[in-house]
Image: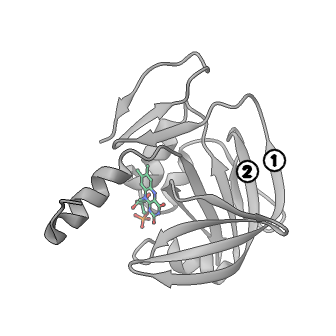
């Protein structure tokens, strides 16, 4: 272990660029206003009960609304939905983000992306704070899955796709 403590942030960042993650959009509604952000932090937690988590920066505009509404949807993006990932990670702001892609609302008014790989509807069941982020644990209420497995992936600061889906391009971010 030769790294100096002052280089820890940089080395951690470099290491995390080697972690490939699927890209999702978290969507919610609070007081009639829709909010959404692109995330790679979704991971399953438990099958009993079916549950998952995502991490959200406390400065994100989605942070307070998702906690206050207590409901959200994880929209797992398809390999061809880079435009949506871009819109929900800063290219577009506020509820204008929902102009990108085909969105509908469930019985609780939670927005969901109709052509996503999957929609996982959750109730926020536990929230922990750590560093700059909150970890939101969602109890799964409802799931919709469609099409073949062809997720949008993110690694080394770029969008990419998995092997075996016939698409072999990499798109730089920004
Ligand atoms: C590929 C990718 C993954 C991201 N993952 C997360 C994440 O897990 N948690 C998070 O809080 N922000 C994440 N972000 C950043 C947010 O999408 C971005 O800051 C967004 O604009 C926040 O929304 P706001 O501007 O409405 O606050 C990610 C961005 C990208 C491009």
**In the rendered image, which quarter is residue 44 located in?**
bottom right
Task: Report the residue at 43% width, 21% height from top.
Answer: 169
* Position in image of residue 151 (x %, y %): 60, 36
Q: What element carries label 1?
A: strand
Task: Report the residue at 37% width, 30% height from top.
Answer: 171
Instruction: Give neighbour class at mark 2: few <14, some 14-19, many 20+ (Cα, 10 Å).
Output: many
Q: Is residue 138 above or below residue 164?
A: below
In the rendered structure, the answer to whether residue 104 lies left or right of residue 150 reads: right
In the rendered structure, the answer to whether residue 93 lies left or right of residue 48 reads: left
Looking at the rendering, in which quadrant would you find the N terminus? bottom left
For the residues marked 1 and 2, what is the alpha-carbon distance in whole angstroms?
Answer: 5 Å
* Position in image of residue 14 (x %, y %): 28, 51
Q: What element carries label 2?
A: strand
The residue carrying mark 1 is 144
Residue 93 is marked as none
Split into quadrants, the picture shows ligand 1 in the one at bottom left
Q: Return the residue nearer the eye: 173 or 132.
A: 132
Question: Which residue lies most toward the front here?
Answer: 1
Q: Return the residue nearer the eye: 42 or 79.
A: 42
Q: Do the residues labelled 1 and 2 touch (CB within 8 Å)?
A: yes
**In the rendered image, which quarter is residue 52 located in?**
bottom right
Q: Is residue 142 above or below residue 125?
A: above
Instruction: Give neighbour class at mark 1: few <14, some 14-19, many 20+ (Cα, 10 Å).
Output: few
In the rendered structure, the answer to whether residue 111 lies left or right of residue 35 reads: right
- Total marks drawn? 2
Task: Report the residue at 45% width, 42% height from top.
Answer: 154
Looking at the rendering, in which quadrant would you find the C terminus? top left
* Position in image of residue 93 (x %, y %): 42, 59
The residue carrying mark 2 is 119
Q: Which colour scheme is used?
A: one colour
């Amino acid at each position: 272990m030769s790294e100096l403590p002052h280089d820890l942030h940089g080395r951690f960042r470099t290491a995390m660029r080697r972690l490939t993650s699927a890209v999702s959009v978290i969507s919610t509604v609070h007081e009639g206003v829709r909010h959404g952000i692109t995330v790679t932090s979704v991971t399953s937690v438990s099958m009993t009960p079916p549950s998952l988590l995502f991490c959200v920066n406390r400065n994100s505009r989605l942070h307070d609304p998702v906690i206050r509404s207590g409901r959200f949807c994880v929209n797992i993006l398809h390999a061809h939905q880079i435009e949506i990932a871009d819109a929900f990670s800063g290219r577009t702001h506020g509820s204008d983000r929902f102009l990108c892609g085909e969105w509908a609302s469930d019985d609780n008014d939670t927005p969901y992306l109709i052509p996503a790989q999957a929609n996982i509807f959750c109730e926020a069941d536990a929230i922990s704070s750590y560093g700059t982020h909150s970890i939101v644990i969602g109890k799964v209420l409802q799931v919709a899955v469609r099409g073949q497995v062809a997720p949008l992936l993110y690694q080394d600061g770029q969008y990419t796709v998995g092997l075996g889906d016939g698409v072999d391009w990499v798109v730089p971010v920004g």
